[in-house]
Image (spheres, grey):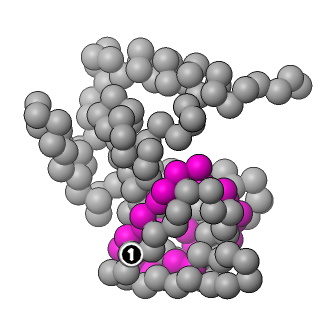
Amino acid sequence: MTNIDEKVLYGMVKKALTELLSGQGAAAPSWKTTDPSGIMSVRTAQVKPEPFDTGKAGDRVFLKDISDLSESPRLGFGVMEMDRSVFKWTLNYDEVDYIIDGTLEILIDGRKVVGHAGDVIFIPAHSTIEFSAPGQVRFFYVVYPANWYEQ
C-alpha cells in the first residue's frame, strides 16, 4: 500500500463532498437550520454522532461534525460521545470542549484534567493527550482553525 499525503487526501475528500453537497438534492439535517445570513441554529440534543475509528478495537467513540468548511471556514464544531474508552490524540488546532452530560478526562503527561456536565475544557494546539471517558460522556467541541488539515 502506498502512502498518501494527508493534504492531498484532504483535498480529494473536500472536493468530493463539495460536489456531492452542492445543491444536488442533499437535504439539510433536521437538527440544523441555517439562515441565508450564515447564522446557524443547532438542536444538539438531536445530533446523532456516528462511529469514530480511534485505531483501537473495542473503543466506543462517536462524533458528528456540525459544520463543513463551506459553512464555517474558520471554526469547526460538532458533538462527540464516548463510553468507557480512552484514545490518544495529537491536536493540530486549539479545541474547546463543553461537557453536556457525563465526565470527560483529558490525560496529559501523567496528569488528569477532569470536566463534568456544564464544564468547559480548553486544549491548546499541538498537545498530545488521551481523551478518556470513565463512563458515558457527551460533549460539544469547537476547533480553530477549522482547516487544520490544510496547514
Along the viewing direction, whichever of 5 and 79 lies nearer the viewer:
5
Who is closer to the viewer here, 56 or 93? 93
Q: Secondary structure at mark 1?
A: strand
Query: Relative to 30, is 150 above or below?
Result: above
Magenta region includes residue 82 = yes
What x and y, as percent, mark residue 148? 53, 40
Q: From the image, tell me which residue sits under label 1.
A: 120
Structural crowding at the residue carrying mark 1, measured as other residues with C-alpha within 10 Å and reported as few (<14), some (14–19) or many (≥20):
some
Residue 113 location in percent, x, y?
56, 83
Q: What residue is shown at x 44% (from left), y 44% (from top)?
A: 145
- Residue 98, placed above or below residue 66: below
User: Does 71 appear in magenta?
Assistant: no
Corner quadrant of residue 8: top right
Which residue is at 38% across, 51% downward? 77
Q: Count up the numbered dots.
A: 1
- The answer to whether 129 appears left or right of 65 in the picture is right
Asked where in the image residue 46 lies, by quadrant, the reply is: bottom left
Q: Is residue 148 above or below residue 80?
A: above
Residue 57: percent from the left, percent from the top? Answer: 77, 59
Q: Residue at x 36, y 22 (%)?
A: 21
> Which kind of residue does numbered mark 1 sit on?
Val
- Quadrant containing the C terminus is top right
Residue at horizontal 29 percent and vertical 34 percent from the top: 71
What secondary structure characterizes most of the magenta part? strand
Q: Quadrant of the N terminus?
A: top right
Q: Nearer the viewer, residue 40 or 91?
A: 91
- Visible residue check, residue 79: no
Q: Magenta segment, which residues?
A: 81-105
Residue 130 is situated, as x and y percent measured from the top left of the image, at 67, 69
Q: Is residue 103 left or right of residue 42?
A: right
